Image (spheres, rainbow, N blue to C red):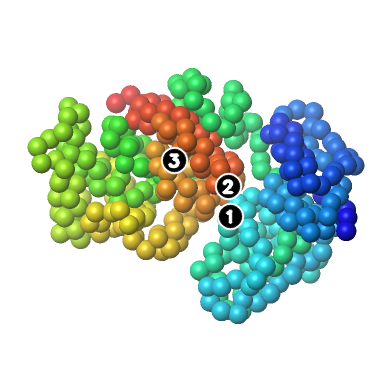
Amino acid sequence: MVATETIEVTGHIVDSLLLAKILDAILDAGCDYEIEDVVIGKTNLDASSARIAVSGDEDVLGPLLDDLQVHGANRTAQVDATLVAADRDGVLPAGFYSTTNLASAVRVDGTWLPVDNPEMDCGLVVRDGRAVTVPMHRVRAGDLVVVGSEGVRVQAPGHARDTQVFEFMASEVSSEKPKALLVEQVAARLRASRERGGKALVVAGPAVVHTGGAPDLARLVADGWVDVLFAGNGFATHDIEANVLGTSLGVSVAEGVPTEGGHANHLRVINEVRRHGSIAAAVDAGFVTGGVMRACVLHGVPFVLGGSIRDDGPLPDVISDTVAAADAMRAHLDGVHVALMLASTLHAIATGNCLPAGVETFCVDINQAVVTKLADRGSHQALGIVTDVGPFVRQLADHLVGSA
């Protein structure tokens, strides 16, 4: 049976090609559409809006509209959300609404409640007159969970060129743009965030150390440009190894050649930090005399080291329970305005999964597949910069701190 529903979408839907994506998705699903009304903003700073009647088989139309909501296209006919109490800890009710990281709202008793903490792939819980995203493992029996997509409104992803997208960038991934200009633009976004009172998050992979970027990242930490650091055992280990033994994965950071017995160097520094009990204790004892981790300790910059099954040791600060690590990351995201992902695939994706879409996100990696993967996994706001991370961090530090 053929049914028709009307949807609305508002935002920068033209210059972002979002409207075209929505129309293509409708046709790809075997449905049809009629644009009932469209208002185009006069400048690239003005929002546009469209009202679209979508027709198709009932069995197809419902799932299609749910998918379109991820792009900020909402049903015009809205009712209160359906709330169902969870019957056990850690288990969402059947048919629960799966959240996006876009700004959203839930209608309860005729009132739209803004979602406090947009995060993708969570349940939506209404409690004490507020709507919050809750990871599945944090749901408790009795929590009122939104079931179905009715009564939920999602805001289209932002595309205001004066804040989130470089004027000269026509694509989400930049491999052939002037690198100096890209660095300058990222530096400008970090300055603007600081002026607004926002925090800067850095997610770093071991390649930052291998490519010689760690001393420059330490400069950024020491000068207050990094407010929180996420990394894994590998980054922290090789940062400490480079400052204690002068190698990174056994390769001399000064000469770029393997050292005799260097394959065990990372294990030796892990062992000694474990002997001290923590990275901070190793810094206090004078064992770690430089590097990013020492700068974080000395300047009170919180860090979360998320573990992996591949980790050696690991360092005593590493959170080996991945669920606990994700929760620890979430605890530091309030107030983050800019996220800088530096040569990290898994930790970048993990962080992106927790970030609201409104956080300006830059992913820097020499491998284009890495910088596109973040956006493919749902972090639509991510801008990719394909370049060697070491020189990038050095130039960024020169912009923000001054030449070393």
Mark 2 → mark 1, Cα distance in angstroms:
8 Å
Image check: 273 left or right of 55? left
Specify the amino acid type for callout 1. Met
Q: Position of residue 246 (x, y in %)?
A: 16, 37
Q: Position of residue 180 (x, y in %)?
A: 45, 21
Q: Position of residue 62 (x, y in %)?
A: 77, 57
Specify the amino acid type for callout 2. Gly
Image check: 358 left or right of 50? left
Q: Residues within 10 Å of mark 1 (few under 14, many from 20)?
A: many
Earlier sequence position, callout 2 versus callout 3: 3
Q: Along the line of sight, which residue is nearer the eye, 399 or 119?
A: 119
Answer above or below: position of 338 versus 61.
above
What residue would you read off at disc 1? 120
Earlier sequence position, callout 3 versus callout 1: 1
What residue would you read off at disc 2? 378
Q: Residue at x 58, y 47 (%)?
A: 378
Q: Secondary structure at mark 3?
A: strand
Q: Residue at x 20, y 32 (%)?
A: 253
Q: Secondary structure at mark 2?
A: loop
Earlier sequence position, callout 2 versus callout 1: 1
What is the number of callouts on the image?
3
Q: Residue at x 24, y 54 (%)?
A: 312
Asked whether residue 312 is in view, the answer is yes
Asked whether residue 153 is in view, the answer is no
Q: Residue at x 32, y 37 (%)?
A: 207
Which numbered disc covers residue 341? 3
Q: Along the line of sight, which residue is nearer the eye, 146 or 42?
A: 146
Q: Quadrant of residue 251?
A: top left
